[in-house]
Image (cartoon, grey):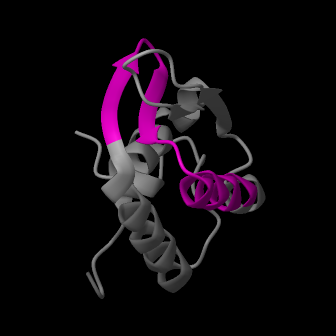
Amino acid sequence: MDGEPLPMFEAPSGASCALPDDQLRERIDALARIGDDLIESRVDGDLHVLVFRASPEVRRALEQIVAAERECCSFLDLTIEDRPATGQEPGRLVLTVAAPPEGALVAAGFAAAFGAA
């Protein structure tokens, strides 16, 4: 990935990730690692919904990612929701990603970095 531009984290409107390329690549790698626990990904209108296996490690990783993203991509609206286990269904962690229209491409790139289709 070295030397490749990262257009998925830039939008024509200027809403883009504030990280330098080398740190952005590290962040993308971190998102991909937690993507191993991604079990569902969908787009609901302008909202990207990412569902992960629930565990303390995954929650901690998601919280760290959300905190870091708030520093470099403050226009992203990131929310973590716990979905407790019920009957046969195991617990899940749901990360929702939204952005204003000018940041929609960045939101989509962010969601895709987890391995979301």
> Which residue is pictured at 37% across the width and 19% down the height?
88
> Which residue is pictured at 30% across the width and 86% down the height?
3
Residue 110 higher or lower than 80, as above or below:
below
Q: Magenta stretch?
A: 39-67
On the image, the x and y values in percent for residue 105 come to 43, 39
On the image, the x and y values in percent for residue 68 come to 70, 63
> Which residue is pictured at 40% across the width and 73% down the height?
29
- Image-based side of 30 in relation to 17, left or right: left
Q: How many dots with numbers?
A: 0
On the image, the x and y values in percent for residue 41 come to 33, 32
- Image-based side of 66 in relation to 96, left or right: right
Residue 117 higher or lower than 10, as above or below:
above
Q: Does the magenta stretch include residue 32?
A: no
> Which residue is pictured at 46% across the width and 55% down the height?
9
Q: 51 or 99: nearer the eye? A: 51
Q: 26 or 33: nearer the eye? A: 33
Q: Does the magenta stretch include residue 52?
A: yes
Residue 92 higher or lower than 58, as above or below:
above
- Image-based side of 64 in relation to 35, left or right: right
